[in-house]
Image (spheres, rainbow, N blue to C red):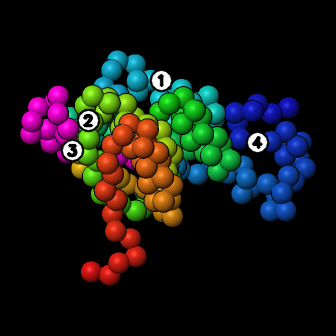
Amino acid sequence: MSDARDGVPEEAADGEDATPDGGHAATTPSTHTVRLELVDEPGQLLAALHPIADNGGNLLSIYHERGNKTPRGRIPVEVDFEATQERFEGIVEALRSEGVNVMQAGTERYAEEVTILLFGHLIDTDLSDSLSRIEACESASVADVSLAAPQGTEQASSARLRLEARAGETEAALAAVRELADEKDLRLVEPLTGVEA
């Protein structure tokens, strides 16, 4: 009998090979790194570690950058742990389903960067909600925000957003922003694509 957390499938524990290579590739843990973005509130780090432990990850190290905040005012945390590839994928999925913002998972990185402009009643239409909804799109992360409201919060304002998108998923990220802009009656200036400088 095998414990589900020990990384050895029951059939492999009984001496039978689960895969052509003897089951070693599927059951040999390797080191993985996830980079998370956490809200600066008590208990958030512990809550982010539960999905790792609950899915069989063996914690190696935590780098908690409390003094260094992301543009959205959150704390970047890097977690190293051991897990099989299958468990690693389950851990990343569990983190995301718990609402933890996974900025990087293993080799999965945000590889494309675009800058967009939004104009309109950004504050009246809840800028925080707009940023959260863009972040909810799994294709992109908001890397930087610059807000300008020269006539005060009651008038139209503008924001420059730098988005980091996963390789090949920039269009999906922009589609999410377009939908948000249409819904909130905001003007969107998109980056030029396919144009040589």
Task: Residue 50: say if magenta.
Answer: no
Q: Quadrant of residue 77?
A: top left
Classify mark 3: residues with Cα within 10 Å, few (<14), some (14-19) or many (20+): many
- Distance from disc 3 to disc 1, alpha carbons, whole Å, reads 35 Å
Q: Name the residue beneath numbered marker 3.
A: 158
Q: Dot 2 corresponds to which residue?
A: 121
Question: Quick one: SS at disc 4?
Answer: loop
Q: Give the residue type at disc 1.
A: Ala
Q: Circle 4: is it few (<14), some (14-19), or many (20+) Cα within 10 Å?
A: many
Q: Which residue is mark 4?
A: 8
Range of residues picked out in magenta:
141-158
Q: Which residue is mark 1?
A: 47
Which comes before the other along the chain, label 1 or label 2?
1
Question: What percent of the width, then of the height, locates residue 108?
Answer: 50, 56
Q: Are marks 1 and 2 in contact (CB under 8 Å)?
A: no
Earlier sequence position, callout 3 versus callout 4 = 4
